[in-house]
């Protein structure tokens, strides 16, 4: 019976144009992406600052392996917390202006750990409707009462916080800083003021803002005029703009001590490889100091939006490196992506359930590796495909 269900579900996915499969990529992440010996201009990478294959980071990983070996050897509380881990935590505290840091193997793990650990049966979790799946799933699995507020709608959030039944509950508000599928930014000052007014904790998942936004790449919170230490919980990853992998949670020392003592995903997971952590530290230094990467990215974003809108292409309301081209129908989005591949452009069709029904899209991502002519040519190619020219 279980096998019949599997086959039925997979068949349904295929019929709806929602089936997913893996594609093997040769070589490294960069401006070009190679699949089956053919190269494409790569517009599907989260490597926003172009660091994933930077020679300095390759050298850092090699040096880190020479200094510390490859594996961490254990969980952080046993033997897996190396000097490299400690150094990275200190560096992040200095760069981002936070009090304490805990390292995780992935952003998914970090988000699950926070929600499962902090929220109990009578607590209230308030999430933006478009938050990442890791946050939503953790909320559904927790004992707390989860409510979703309309995307970036502070009036709706305020109405939920003002309900009499919520007044005595411990409350946690969670939003992404930059939304991963739409590329728009959260109204962080509004979130902060509502959290403060209603005695709620505020958590920001800044996976797509760290390194890209704010002075010295401090992220979306800093870009909004707030400080990262204004929040109770600041979380981000090392696998997007920093080009490596892993994640962290930052907050007051007491929060991090609580994670260290009670969070099962933290306690019972093998630590990040120290050579990798050594590389993350170098990536963080480059992200903090090399403003030219952010400057170039902003030029590319402006060029793409100007060119695409000038051609009548429907874009999402985003001024970040994530530029959604809204198609609507899932099968049509797949068709457009395949036609673009034939023209030499690697774009990805994002479909439900990752995005709402009838909002299938091309998730165009720009990186500092691109050139202005690349994004102009991409715009023209999208126009040709959408208009059958």
Image: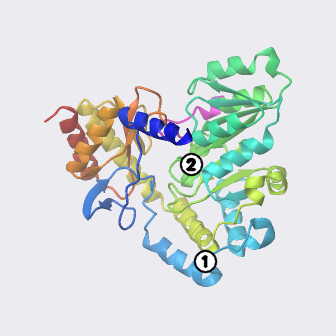
Reading the image, the residue beneath label 2 is 207
Q: Nearer the viewer, mark 1 or mark 2?
A: 1
Residue 240, given in percent of the width and then of the height, sits at 51, 54
Determine whether, in the image, residue 65 is placed left or right of residue 341.
right
SS for tag 2?
A: loop
Identify the image quadrant of the N terminus: top right
Determine which residue is flagged by label 1: 70
Q: Is residue 275 left or right of residue 212?
A: right
**Is 185 part of what is drawn in magenta?**
yes
Image x and y of residue 375, in percent: 28, 47
Q: Residue at left 40%, top 51%?
A: 297
Is residue 232 in view? no
Distance between mark 1 and mark 2 Cα atoms: 25 Å
Question: In front: 24, or 387?
Answer: 24
> Can I make out residue 346 in this image?
yes
Query: In the rendering, at what x and y percent does residue 265 appear?
Result: 73, 54
Residue lying farthest to the front in this orientation: 1
Quarter of the image for the C terminus: give it: top left
């Amino acid at each position: 019976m279980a096998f019949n269900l599997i086959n039925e579900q997979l068949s349904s996915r295929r019929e709806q144009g929602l089936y997913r499969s893996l594609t093997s990529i040769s070589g490294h992440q960069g401006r070009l992406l190679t699949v089956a010996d053919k190269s494409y201009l790569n517009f599907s990478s989260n490597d926003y600052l172009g660091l994933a294959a930077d020679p300095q980071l390759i050298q850092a990983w090699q040096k880190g392996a020479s200094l510390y070996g490859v594996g961490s050897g254990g969980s952080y509380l046993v033997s897996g917390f190396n000097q490299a881990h400690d150094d990275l935590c200190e560096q992040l505290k200095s760069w981002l202006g936070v009090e304490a840091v805990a390292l995780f193997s992935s952003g998914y793990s970090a988000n699950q750990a926070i929600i499962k650990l902090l929220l109990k049966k009578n607590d209230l979790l308030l999430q933006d409707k478009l938050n990442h799946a890791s946050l939503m799933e953790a909320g559904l699995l927790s004992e707390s009462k989860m409510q979703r507020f309309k995307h970036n709608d502070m009036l709706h959030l305020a109405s939920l916080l003002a309900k009499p039944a919520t007044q005595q509950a411990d409350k946690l508000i969670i939003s992404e800083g930059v939304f991963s599928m739409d590329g728009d930014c959260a109204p962080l000052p509004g979130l902060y003021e509502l959290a403060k007014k209603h005695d709620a904790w505020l958590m920001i998942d800044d996976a797509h803002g760290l390194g890209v936004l704010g002075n010295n790449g401090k992220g979306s919170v800093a870009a909004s005029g707030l400080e990262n230490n204004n929040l109770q919980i600041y979380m981000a990853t090392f696998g997007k703009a920093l080009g490596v992998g892993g994640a962290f949670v930052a907050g007051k020392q007491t929060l991090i001590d609580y994670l260290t003592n009670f969070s099962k995903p933290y306690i019972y997971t093998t630590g990040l490889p120290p050579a990798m952590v050594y590389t993350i530290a170098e990536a963080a230094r480059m992200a903090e100091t090399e403003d030219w990467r952010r400057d170039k990215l902003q030029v590319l974003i402006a060029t793409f939006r100007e060119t695409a809108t000038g051609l009548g292409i429907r874009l999402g309301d985003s001024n970040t490196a994530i530029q959604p081209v809204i198609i609507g129908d899932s099968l049509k989005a797949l068709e457009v992506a395949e036609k673009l591949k034939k023209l030499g452009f690697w774009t990805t069709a994002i479909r439900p359930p990752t995005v709402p029904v009838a909002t299938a899209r091309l998730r165009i991502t720009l990186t500092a590796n691109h050139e202005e002519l690349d994004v102009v040519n991409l715009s023209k190619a999208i126009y040709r495909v959408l208009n059958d020219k």
